[in-house]
Image (spheres, rainbow, N blue to C red):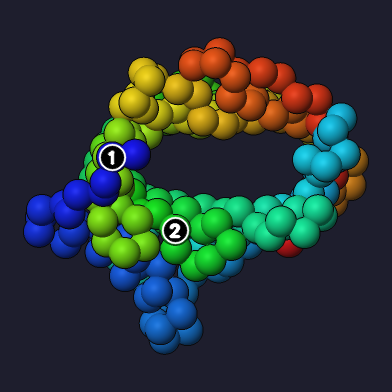
Amino acid sequence: MKKLRQPGKKALSTLLIPIALVGSIYLAPKKTHADINGSLEAIVSEKKENSYARLNGFYQLPGEINGFTFLEFYKDGKGFFGKSMLTKGLSKTFSVKGELVHINEPVTYAGVGLGLNLPMPKGSYGSLKVLPVWVDKQGKYAPNKVIVGYVAGADLGKGWSMSSFGEANIAAKQGPKWCYGEVAVTKEIGKGVNVGYIPALKPVGKLAPKLEHRIGVQIRF
């Protein structure tokens, strides 16, 4: 395995920004915090061992930085997985993005890049991201890792909605490789309660995801 090489000072200083921003939500005075909202989900997969609970949180940091954190807790005792994603708008179209990956610990990897908001019809949304610079928790540059991804969704009316997200590593050693994604078709059945079909788009081969059937219940707060 190729040893990780140290990033340049510029890359490291850039990646410290999203890390510092996440920390600031705990350190900043309460009056600087915007409303925090989120949801709790129960995901039931056709493969029982892949079922889990997921906690989602949306918040705003000082400087008009939007944050989203999710944590998935697995019932097989293997711990948790999550991400914290921070977005600072540069214009209506472009933004700076930072991500922290949490694999059974506060920070496993940190990445930084750019986001692009797509022009979409009314009642829908879509965006792309490219994160070309990553370091591990020791601050070592992670080679062969350039993450590109998308988020899209639409309000279908009468309480129905559809959304999807996914990402791939276009710099993987063996060529571009799909990482993970989801599709969700949900129906609001009560105030703050959604149920729906939420299949996972799992990696298989290179850029061809495999569908894993799942259903879910979401309670918003």
Left or right of residue 50, residue 26 in this image:
left
Q: Position of residue 205 (x, y in %)?
A: 55, 16
Above or below, 170 against 134 in this view is: above
View extreme (left): residue: 9
In front: 99, or 66?
99
Alpha carbon distance from label 2 to label 1: 19 Å
| Pointer 2 residue | 108
| Pointer 1 residue | 2
Left or right of residue 54, residue 58 in this image:
left
Above or below, 87 against 16 in this view is: above
Quarter of the image where one finds residue 50: top right
Left or right of residue 201, residue 86 in this image:
left
Q: Position of residue 36 (x, y in %)?
A: 58, 66
Q: Mark 1: which amino acid?
A: Lys
Asked which secondary structure carries label 1, the reply is loop
Mark 2 burial class by Cα count in 10 Å: few <14, some 14-19, many 20+: some
Q: How many marks?
A: 2
- Checking the image for residue 190, the label placed there is none
Above or below, 152 against 68 in this view is: above
Quadrant position of the N terminus in the picture: top left
Res 68 seen here: no
Q: Position of residue 170 (x, y in %)?
A: 35, 24
Q: Position of residue 13 (x, y in %)?
A: 16, 62
In front: 50, or 128?
50
